[in-house]
Image (cartoon, helix red, strand yellow):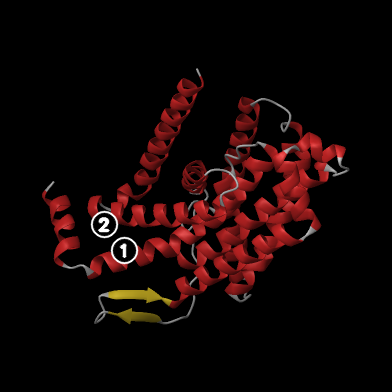
Amino acid sequence: MDQILGNLSLLFEFPVVNVKIILDGVMIGALFALAAYGLALVWGVMNVKNLAQGDFVITGGYVAWWLSGKGLPPLLGVPIAFVVLWGIGWVIYKLVISRVIERDLFTSLLATFGLAIMIAQLLNLMFGSDTQSVQLQYDTLYFFNGFVDVPIAKLIGVLMAISLAAVIIIFMKTSRMGQAIRATAQDARAARVLGIDTEKVYAFTFSLNSAICGAAGAIIVMVWVIQPFYGISYSIRAFVIVTAAGLGNLPGVIAAGLGIGAAEQYGAHIFGIGYQQAVAVLLLLLVLMVRMLQQRRMRQSLK
């Protein structure tokens, strides 16, 4: 308890510590938001709650890590992971997801949970259970007389995440496939009547989600660490963000992603690094409780 109080007092005695925590939270939160946007696409268009979301992220990280070990520039791993995970996502859609779209919620949850276990075990068999990362040979920027450090590698990662998000947003708003995706999300039956091939839209959406996760994982391995069984933590974060922001609310997804990133950093500072992921679980429970209360009030108002 004394240590917790001491950590709290540091936030008030040395305000610059807050700057460091918020910067770290924003940089990692941007990657959380990127993965969550992919989940929001699948959830909104196909009504599939993908419990393997985080495992796609970790798979993308291992693709970039493996390529780096073969001598390829680490930054090149991001577009390659995007393409590789696109292909993996398309295969998984054809073999598994296409069979559960019209099924009940429990079936889709069970199918994607099985996918998450399978992917984690395959990664463990192929690469081992040790944590891995890609070391970028970039300097670190220092501010406030050295009290705040910002690795250039993290800045590059954030810029890449922002660039990818911008490209996806432009694609969704201007391309015919983007318009078809939005139409299918609004009303799949009406979209089919208008001549939209919803099966093609579903396959494209799930593949795009997998590719987004792959790129996010390739960035994460350059600024953090990955391990075969870390996928569940990213899945929880993605669910927290999407549940809090709501489907189709891109600004909300970005804000929630940055918020959960900052909250985790504050939790790690106050309670210790071991409680960092517990903050995400706590936030998920709080968000679900708030949503339940909102739905109960709506039902009461309709009576």
Is 124 on the left or on the right of 224, as rendered?
right
Q: Is residue 236 above or below residue 106?
A: below
Q: Position of residue 92 (x, y in %)?
A: 72, 43
State the residue in front, 15 or 35: 15
Q: Secondary structure at mark 1?
A: helix
* Residue on which disc 1 sits: 21
* Residue on which disc 2 sits: 269
Q: Earlier in the sequence, mark 1 or mark 2?
A: 1
Q: Residue at x 63, y 75 (%)?
A: 72
Q: Position of residue 218 (x, y in %)?
A: 57, 63
Can residue 23 be seen in this snapshot?
yes
Cβ atoms under marks 1 and 2 closer than 8 Å: yes
Q: Residues within 10 Å of mark 1 (few under 14, many from 20)?
A: many
Residue depth check, mark 1 versus mark 2: number of the one nearer the observer: 1
**From this viewpoint, which residue is outermost toward the top?**
303
Q: Residue at x 42, y 38 (%)?
A: 287
**From this viewpoint, which residue is outermost toward the left?**
2
Q: Secondary structure at mark 2?
A: helix
Q: Residue at x 31, y 63 (%)?
A: 21
- Which amino acid type corresponds to the residue marked 2 in the rendered image? His
- Which amino acid type corresponds to the residue marked 1 in the rendered image? Ile
